[in-house]
Amino acid sequence: MPIYKIREKFWFWEADYYIQDEQGNTLFSLQNKWFAMDHAMKLIDEQPQTQLEGDDLVERPIDSPPKKEKEILLTIRKKIVSLGPVFQVIRSDNTVVAEIKKKRIWTQQRYVLDMADVEYVVDESKWRNQKTFSIRYSSKKKETIADVFKKSRLRDMSGSFWVDVKVDPGYYEGQALKDMCATVLAACITMLQILSENEIEELKQQQERELKAKRDKMPFDTLS
């Protein structure tokens, strides 16, 4: 099963992502416009382009100058007209290949991923303490399609996130495998953004409650 490393690079108020394989090769990059109105993010293919010339395959060398326009594989966009937060993963031909939204399951509101006519549930129970979450089938089966976790290494003090994508290579192969992994990675990065944003909002609300509690304890003369 492929394992990917997600590195963040901060630019002022935004952070771009670089997705690498276990050997450190950059496979994808993600331009982050999360603070825009539609929360748009673009997943870009960073692999050398391969093209046909006659009967031979000619691959552009890695050290050659890159093309001015890189291929945008997927766009992650917030659905504007919706009753709740809905994030869509859209292919270059404007086909929606996945959706992330909140859904009531039993008595809880859970994030779910709809992809390839299959519904998956985001298990975020360990996010607060361990900064990890899983995307698993919504049925009673415990199998996961992706595990996201954070770990720090001596050579990697940034504590990058790692994604273990559990896509069956026997079912997907070639370009289909690459597209499926890219879609799962896009969904994982979207959930990272959502969970981080929720954490910031919870911290802000906690600080406001603590400030209000301090004000309530103050004598009336002090407040005036």
Image (spheres, rainbow, N blue to C red):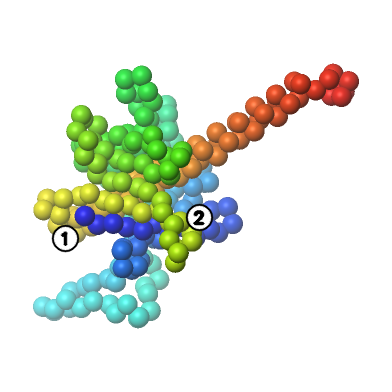
Quarter of the rendering containing residue 12: bottom right
Residue 24 lies, in percent from the top left, at 35, 67
Identify the residue at horizontal 16%, vertical 76% (top origin): 57
Estimate the x, y position of residue 210 in percent, counting from the top left.
67, 29
Q: Is residue 156 left or right of residue 101?
A: right
Q: Tell me what residue is drawn at x 76 percent, y 24 percent.
A: 215
Residue depicted at x 37% and y 73%: 67
Q: Amino acid at mark 2?
A: Ala
Q: Which residue is the site of mark 2?
A: 15
Q: Find residue 195 and report its horizontal and vertical position in percent.
A: 45, 40
Per the image, label 2 sits on a secondary structure element best described as strand
Q: Position of residue 105 (x, y in %)?
A: 32, 23
The answer to which of 111 and 221 lies nearer the viewer is 221
Q: Amino acid at mark 1?
A: Gly
The residue that mark 1 highlights is 174
Asked if one can make out residue 46 in the rendered structure from this viewpoint, the answer is no
Q: Nearer the viewer, residue 167 or 36?
A: 167
Q: Is residue 208 visible?
A: yes
